[in-house]
Amino acid sequence: MTFIALATEDVLSEAIGLRLLSELPTQVTPSPLLRKDGSGYLRSRMDNWRQLAQRQTIIIITDLDQVSCPITLKNNWLGNRPAPLNLILRIAVREIESWILADHEAMRNLIGNKGTLPPFPDDLLDPKQHLLQIAKSASKNVRHDLVKEKNAIASQGIGYNSRLTAWVRSEWSPERAAQRSPSLRRARIRLHELSQRLKEVNH
């Protein structure tokens, strides 16, 4: 049994990571799951992730946010040292919501036929706000979960994470989404390369 550690910013990114691992041709067990709110936790523990990578593969998924490009973020996080072979850092451009929005078929099942879905979600400056905007035209139950109530302090509805994580597990397709999101496509390529390497090692 091959264990792969998964380090993410939040519960939604974790759900995406688990879905990506579940589609690999080589069966893997995601463990441990390493998650706290925000990218600061991930970046501050890079030395820990390097040490962990000496024992097992670790996949880190983070948002690009306002950093200029993925290469800049990688250089900032990794410094001048190359990443260990078993440390895979993947970056959602600009947020994990861009990967979510990239599966138009599943999004239509979630929010209905109203609202414009982005043809190139990686180009959005604020994918989460775009998702929240089009969610306003969804059915009442979905809208209530995703969109914040008037005058609420939170930027999203109270059921945002639970609704979307369940949807990711049941409907979201990494293969479909990768057709519209280059950053997701690169992540899938790296993970499938990893799967092939693990297959060769185990034989």
Image (spheres, rainbow, N blue to C red):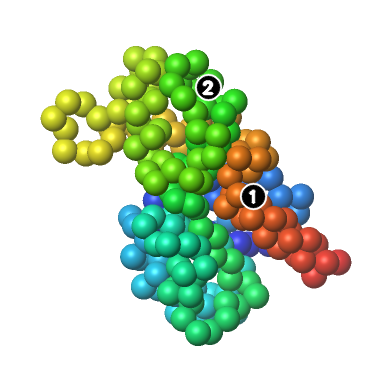
Instruction: Say which element carries label 2.
Output: helix
Q: Is residue 68 left or right of residue 146?
A: right
Q: Is residue 159 left or right of residue 90?
A: left
- Given the current orientation, which residue lies at the most extreme bottom position? 80
Mark carried by residue 185: 1
Q: Residues within 10 Å of mark 2 (few under 14, many from 20)?
A: some
Q: Does residue 99 appear in the picture of this structure?
A: yes
Q: Residues within 10 Å of mark 1 (few under 14, many from 20)?
A: some
At which x and y percent is residue 30? 58, 55
- Residue at image position (55%, 34%) is 119
- Residue at image position (50%, 16%) is 113
Q: Quadrant of the N terminus?
A: bottom right
At which x and y percent is residue 118? 50, 33
Q: Which residue is mark 2?
A: 108
Task: Tell me the quarter of the picture where residue 88 sits.
Answer: bottom right
Instruction: Report the number of numbered marks.
Output: 2
Q: Is residue 65 left or right of residue 202?
A: left
Q: From the viewer's perspective, is residue 128 above or below residue 72?
A: above
At which x and y percent is residue 21? 63, 50
Mark carried by residue 151: none
Residue in the foreground of this view, choosing between 201 and 115: 115
Q: Quadrant of the C terminus?
A: bottom right
Task: Tell me the quarter of the picture where residue 126 sits.
Answer: top left
Residue in the foreground of this view, choosing between 51 and 91: 91
- Residue at image position (40%, 70%) is 43
Q: Are marks 2 and 1 in contact (CB under 8 Å)?
A: no
